[in-house]
Amino acid sequence: MPGYNMRYSKVKATGKISAQQATFELKQRIVLSLNKIADKDTYQIGKDDLEKIAESLTVDGIGPFISIIVDTDSEQKSAVRKECIRIMSLLARIHGEQLGPYIGKMVNSIVRRLKDSDSIVRDACVETVGVLASVMMQSQSVGNCPKESGATFVVFVRPLFEALGEQNKQIQSGSALCLAAVINNSTDPPVAILQRLLTRVIKLLRNQHFLAKPALLELAASLIQ
């Protein structure tokens, strides 16, 4: 039996190496597609490649994929920043509730991009968060939090509402529009949370130092409907 145990251990080790190799190769493909997106001559090729990767992801590949696309910063090309936000919509449509453990990280990434200097990137944030809310609010859970508790809704709302407190017009406007998109695209959002949000939004509307009143009015309209 010693020989069997040794062979079994070797198989296990080989399997582990294969899994690590698969993750490494996946990350390489993602980075290569993002490099193509950064070049205007290969932008469409890179965009198509990134979408194909997203469509073919296994459950084990979702985490590594998300870890790369949420790690963009202002030093990267605008096209890369936009596509890393936009691809989240495709992930949600294809993989649905399998994104549950990662949705908080994705929303936080969107919030960070609301300060982006490019309005196209900020617009992509609003569109994408609406799609994420539409898909995830129909799922049973986000992470280990049951939908019935309102935890799914809170995962979206809390970081966006906190961003309303930033003294930056772009962030205030973007977060208000994102909140409106979340509310408009959510299935049966918790009424108690909506009521609390409306109370806070009314206070912000009365605050003369708030910089993005038009977007806040749009959010108020979504809360009242």
Image (cartoon, rainbow, N blue to C red):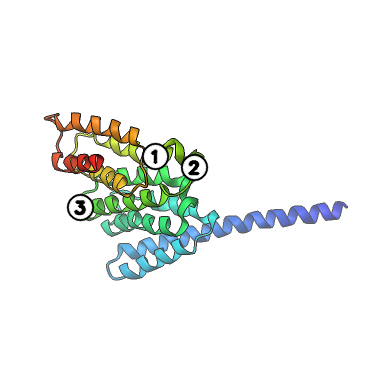
Mark 1 highlights which residue? 155
Asked if labels 1 and 3 touch by Cβ distance under 8 angstroms, the answer is no
Name the residue located 35 percent from the left edge and 50 percent from the top edge: 72
Which kind of residue does numbered mark 1 sit on? Val
Q: CA distance from mark 3 to mark 1?
A: 25 Å
Mark 3 highlights which residue? 119
- Comparing 183 with 117, the one in front is 183
Which kind of residue does numbered mark 3 sit on? Ser
Asked if labels 2 and 1 touch by Cβ distance under 8 angstroms, the answer is yes
Q: Position of residue 56 (x, y in %)?
A: 49, 64
Which numbered disc flags the more N-terminal residue, 3 or 1?
A: 3
Which numbered disc flags the more N-terminal residue, 1 or 2?
A: 2
Foreground label between 3 and 1: 1
| Mark 3 element type | helix
Decide if residue 124 is on the left or right side of residue 156.
Answer: left
- Residue 171 shows up from this direction: no
Image quadrant for the C terminus?
top left
Is 33 placed above or below 174 here? below
Q: Position of residue 224 (x, y in %)?
A: 23, 39
| Mark 1 element type | helix
Q: Position of residue 185 (x, y in %)?
A: 32, 49
Disc 1: CA contacts within 10 A as few (<14), some (14-19) or many (>=20): some
Mark 2 highlights which residue? 143
Decide if residue 24 is on the left or right side of residue 221.
Answer: right
Asked if labels 3 and 2 touch by Cβ distance under 8 angstroms, the answer is no
Q: CA distance from mark 2 to mark 3?
A: 31 Å
